[in-house]
Structure formats: structure tokens, C-alpha cells
């Protein structure tokens, strides 16, 4: 069965993190080659379908109403607008379309529109992903029946550090929604953010939690904090880039069959750092010049990087061949 792997202990995970970098990278690249084509990168496009005014107090987020950010709150956007953006993303080569909403949880009155978005994007031949906050059983079933492929719900950090970052929900709330989604047969996308003032132990613990899910998430986004003005983490000390690479490599080794996504923060990363992340086993990125509200490299910049590194975007056909081979 996919992504079933041994239970990882903290000590074993920490021992990987502490390896000499060359040994860690060699192991990660070896595991990567056993499971994926090392020159292919999956590409996803994000769209914010409801921006700002969020009731949660995530200390990193520009969209929290509690952070006093200047970002104004929007309503859920029209289904047709979503489908227009999805078509553009598909024509630009993205294979997965991720729709994100700044909600604590969706309201039942929004469900018909969300279902129509999933159905419409699927009809275009793209994989669908949503990230809408917490979900109850009914909402999970409706999204599953509409054909939702992935649900993104990040644990963001360790259980220990979680209350330092978010107080309006608990780590356990997060795990509950992930279990509900997984039990309904939707694939889970879950990862976290580095550079929020956490200790190395928190990064390791976060990976242990993810790797020990049964199965591990199919997709693991690793975000580098993009400091947002007017948020409590606006002046957080940036993570050392080599430590960032270590986390990617450890994630690759602990979750050999998951897509590890080099997510937010690429616009502030050098080509060399991104290349090292790909070597460490990252094999997915967000494409397009905006994430949800923050910037991302322009398409031309990514095209130049891919050409320099000899990387290619994974096509939907290749993805379905990989799935069929399992
Ligand atoms: N509201 C939903 C939720 O929190 O689950 C979905 C949207 S939320 C913006 C999705 C994820 O984006 C967060 O869990 C976090 O990991 C990431 N994120 C948000 N702001 C970020 C920032 N400033 N830098 C890096 N990652 C960020
Ligand atoms: C994830 O882990 N990163 C994406 C996606 N999942 C939804 C979001 C990144 C957001 C970066 C900040 C912004 O655009 O506001
Ligand atoms: Fe809201 Fe999600 Fe931002 Fe937290 S991360 S404030 S839940 S939009």
C-alpha cells in the first residue's frame, strides 16, 4: 500500500538531521531515485478563492483579521472566475489546481459553489486541491463526491510550538480534520513553515508526525516563512538555508513516496538554494507569480532555472503512469 513506512522515532529522525550534509544529501537523493524520476518536478497553481478577514490568529498570515493587516476581506469568488483561472493554469502546464480560502471553516451555504469549482476543474483534466480550514464529516463527503483529489491542511510546526504560533485552534483540531479527510479517501497534503523561531527539535517533530500518519501525506509542502508586514512574525529570524535543505532531505527520506513541495519563499531563494532543495528530494513547486497573496517567481524565471538544471515539469500523463505502476 502506498506510503506505508516504518514508524519513525524522534531519535532516528534527529540522527538523519544531524548527519554530515554530504551523507544526508546522498541518502536523500538515493531514496528519491528509487521512487521518482529525479529530473521531473510536479507543478501546482494556487488561487485564492476567498481572501483576508480570517477569524484565526495564525501569527505568520497576512489574511488573519486579528493581525490588523491591511488586506481587505473578499467574499467567495464566482465559480466562473475560478474556472477561467484554472483553464489558464492548465494551458500554462500546471497539473494541479489548488484553491485556498481564508476561513476557519467553510459555511454550509458555500458548499454548492465549492462543489461546482471542484467538478469544473476536474472536467478540464487537472487534479484538484482545496484548503478551506477545518471540515466536518458532511463537508468532507460532499467534496469527496465532487471528485476532490487533495485536501491541504498543514500542521505547520511541532505540537509543542503550535500554541506559540496559533491560539484559536489546536494541533489536535488539525489532526482531526486530516483524519476525516483521509478516512473519506481524499489524499492529504500537509506540511509546514520553517523560520518561525522554532527549534531544530520542532522541525524534526513535525516531520515525525507527518511520516507516522498512516498513510503519510501524498504531498508535503515545506514553506519558508515569507514575513508579512503587521504580523507577529514580521521580524522573525530567517532560517539558515542549509538547515532548510536538511529538512527537505529528511522529509524525502522519511516519506519516500510523497511529493515534497518546495512551497512558499522561492522568490527569496537563490537558484543555488533551489537546486540544492531539488537535489535533496523536493519534486514539486507552485508556479505562477502569486501564491495566495504573496509573490512567487515569474514563469520566465522558473523556465530559465528549469533549463539550467535540466528539469522538466511532470505532465498529467506521466503522473497517471506513476500512479498506475503502484
Ligand atoms: N485557511 C486555510 C488553512 O489555514 O488551512 C488555508 C490557507 S493557509 C494560507 C495555507 C497555508 O499557507 C498555511 O497553513 C501556511 O502553512 C501557509 N502560509 C500562510 N502564510 C504563509 C507565509 N507568510 N509564509 C509561508 N507560508 C505561509
Ligand atoms: C502551502 O503549504 N503553501 C501554500 C498552500 N499550501 C496553500 C500557501 C502559501 C501561502 C504563502 C503566503 C501567501 O500567499 O499569502
Ligand atoms: Fe486563516 Fe489559514 Fe491564514 Fe490561518 S493560515 S489566518 S486559517 S487563512
Image: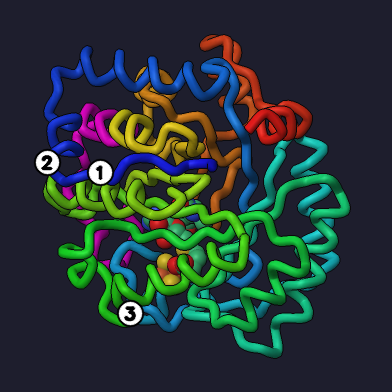
Q: Secondary structure at mark 2?
A: helix
**Disc 2 versus disc 1: distance between alpha carbons?**
8 Å
Q: Secondary structure at mark 3?
A: loop
**Disc 2 versus disc 3: distance between alpha carbons?**
28 Å
Marked residue nearer the N-terminal end (3 or 1): 1
**Disc 3 versus disc 1: distance between alpha carbons?**
26 Å
Q: Look at discs 2 and 3 and give the one toward the viewer.
A: 2
Residue 293, percent from left and from top: 52, 58
- For the residue carrying disc 1, how many other residues have a C-alpha within 10 Å: few (<14), some (14-19), or many (20+)? some
The quadrant where ligand 3 appears is bottom left
Residue 300, percent from left and from top: 63, 25
Marked residue nearer the N-terminal end (2 or 3): 2
User: Which quarter of the figure is the C terminus placed in?
Assistant: top right
Write down the quadrant of residue 109 in the picture.
bottom right
User: Which quarter of the figure is the N terminus placed in?
Assistant: top right
Which stretch did the figure color magenta? 226-248
Write down the quadrant of residue 243 in the picture.
top left
Horizontal placement of 54 versus 253: left or right?
right
Residue at point 63% right, 79% down?
139
In this rendering, is residue 287 above or below 172? above
Query: Does residue 325 belong to the magenta stretch?
Result: no
Q: Which residue is mark 3?
A: 169
Residue at point 40% right, 21% down?
31
- Disc 3 CB within 8 Å of nearest ligand 3 atom: yes
Q: Which residue is mark 1?
A: 8
- For the residue carrying disc 3, how many other residues have a C-alpha within 10 Å: few (<14), some (14-19), or many (20+)? some
Residue at point 12% right, 49% down?
199
Instruction: Work out whether residue 67 can be spotted.
Output: no
From the viewer's side, name the closer residue of 288 and 23. 23
Q: Which residue is mark 2?
A: 11
Horizontal placement of 218 versus 107: left or right?
left
In this rendering, is residue 289 above or below 233? above
Amino acid at each position: 500500500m502506498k506510503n506505508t513506512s516504518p514508524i519513525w522515532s524522534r531519535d532516528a529522525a534527529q540522527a538523519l538531521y544531524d548527519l554530515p550534509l554530504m551523507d544526508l544529501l546522498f541518502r536523500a537523493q538515493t531514496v528519491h531515485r528509487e521512487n521518482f524520476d529525479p529530473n521531473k518536478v510536479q507543478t501546482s497553481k494556487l488561487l485564492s478563492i476567498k481572501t483576508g478577514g480570517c477569524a484565526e490568529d495564525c501569527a505568520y498570515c497576512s489574511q488573519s483579521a486579528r493581525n490588523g493587516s491591511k488586506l481587505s476581506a473578499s467574499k467567495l469568488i464566482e465559480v466562473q472566475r475560478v474556472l477561467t483561472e484554472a483553464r489558464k493554469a492548465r494551458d500554462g502546464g500546471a497539473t494541479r489546481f489548488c484553491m485556498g480560502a481564508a476561513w476557519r471553516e467553510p459555511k454550509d451555504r458555500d458548499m454548492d459553489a465549492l462543489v461546482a469549482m471542484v467538478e469544473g476543474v476536474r472536467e478540464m483534466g487537472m487534479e484538484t486541491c482545496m484548503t478551506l480550514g477545518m471540515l466536518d464529516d458532511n463537508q468532507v463527503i460532499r467534496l469527496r463526491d465532487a471528485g476532490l483529489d487533495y485536501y491541504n491542511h498543514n500542521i505547520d510546526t511541532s505540537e509543542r510550538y503550535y500554541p506559540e504560533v496559533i491560539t484559536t485552534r489546536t494541533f489536535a483540531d488539525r489532526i482531526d480534520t486530516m483524519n476525516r479527510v483521509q478516512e473519506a479517501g481524499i489524499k492529504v497534503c500537509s506540511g509546514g513553515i520553517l523560520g518561525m523561531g522554532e527549534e531544530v527539535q520542532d522541525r524534526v517533530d513535525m516531520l515525525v508526525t507527518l511520516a507516522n500518519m498512516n498513510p503519510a501525506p501524498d504531498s508535503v509542502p515545506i514553506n519558508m516563512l515569507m514575513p508579512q508586514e503587521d504580523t507577529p512574525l514580521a521580524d522573525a529570524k530567517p532560517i539558515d538555508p542549509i538547515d532548510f535543505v536538511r529538512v527537505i532531505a529528511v522529509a524525502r527520506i522519511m516519506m519516500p513516496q510523497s511529493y515534497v513541495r518546495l512551497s512558499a519563499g522561492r522568490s527569496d531563494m537563490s537558484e543555488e538554494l533551489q537546486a540544492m532543495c531539488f537535489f535533496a528530494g523536493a519534486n514539486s513547486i507552485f508556479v505562477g507569480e502569486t501564491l495566495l497573496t504573496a509573490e512567487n517567481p515569474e514563469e520566465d524565471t522558473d523556465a530559465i532555472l528549469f533549463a539550467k538544471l535540466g528539469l522538466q515539469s511532470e505532465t498529467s500523463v506521466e503522473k497517471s503512469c506513476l500512479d498506475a505502476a503502484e
